[in-house]
Image (cartoon, grey):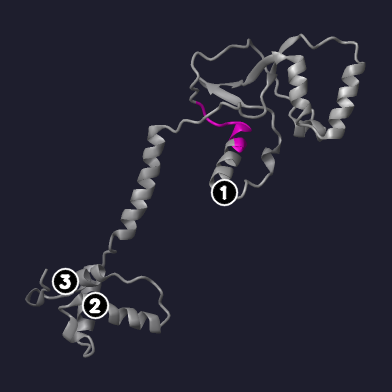
Amino acid sequence: MLESNSFTNGRNLILSTKGKYFYPSQRVIDTDLSSYEYVLVQRLLALSLGIPLPVKGANDDNYGITLIFGGETFQLFEKTNWASRIQHQLKRLPQANAIDITGKIKNSKIQINNRTGYFPLHSLPADACFVIRHSELEKLIEIYCGNKEKSLTSPRISTPLSRLFWLACKHNQAISPLIRQPYKLLSIFEQWASDDGITDRLSGDTLKNALERGSPPSASLPH
């Protein structure tokens, strides 16, 4: 009944279940990942993306896969005979443990080969697949597009700061002749930034908008 890691480490605890076994009415089950299946999915995702596996910790104890229906929690079982279940579990144990248990089974007088039972699943079924909700895809798209849009949007500068910026450029002999050509000013500001160790990316659009907003009406920049 136990998961192999729990068995070899002497953690002989299993979930206490009650009620009848039943089969779901449909093969698609919409449920939260609330048990060890959460860890299993994390590991599958890490393997598929080629990133390090999640660090083990509080979720090392695998008591099976659970499902939530109508606010109630159910455990996932498989229906099989004892012989198949035993062979399946033995393959997951260290060789020394498997040999020892096999010997004890052979010496046992209890006939269990043909008995059928329900056993908790500790790993995802081989044919299991995950369906991503359309709403979740939209959230991912929104995160990506939202961040992209923010990165492309020029930061706004307040009008008082724009006024001071325009005055500083207007009364600087080195750059005053280019004040009506803001994109040519960009290389000068980038050089100044580099000389002073500033590595932020400067925007020609931000420079142009700031000069337009800060200039008096009589000196408005052409669009």
Q: Residues within 10 Å of mark 1 (few under 14, many from 20)?
A: few
Residue 196 to residue 78: above or below: below
> Does label 2 or label 3 sit earlier along the sequence?
2
- Disc nearest the viewer among 2 and 3: 3
Please, what is the three-letter code of the amino acid marked with disc 2?
Phe
Q: CA distance from mark 2 to mark 3?
A: 10 Å
Please, what is the three-letter code of the amino acid marked with disc 3?
Glu
- Disc nearest the viewer among 1 and 2: 1
Q: In the shown orientation, is residue 19 left or right of residue 218? A: right
Q: Nearer the viewer, residue 214 or 95?
A: 95
Residue 194: image quadrant is bottom left
Among all residues in the image, which is located at the extreme right? 107
> Does label 1 or label 2 sit earlier along the sequence?
1
Q: Give residue 73's position: percent from left, percent from top.
A: 58, 22
Residue 61: image quadrant is top right
Q: Nearer the viewer, residue 20 or 215?
A: 20
* Residue 113 numbered mark, or none: none
- Disc nearest the viewer among 3 and 1: 1
Q: Give residue 81's position: percent from left, percent from top.
A: 73, 13
Q: Is residue 100 magenta?
A: no
- The residue tagged 2 is 165
Q: Give residue 3's position: percent from left, percent from top.
A: 73, 29
Q: In the shown orientation, is residue 26 left or right of residue 100? A: left
Q: Nearer the viewer, residue 76 or 176?
A: 76
Magenta region: 31-40
Q: Main secondary structure of the magenta part?
A: loop
- The residue tagged 3 is 212
* Residue 50 numbered mark, or none: 1
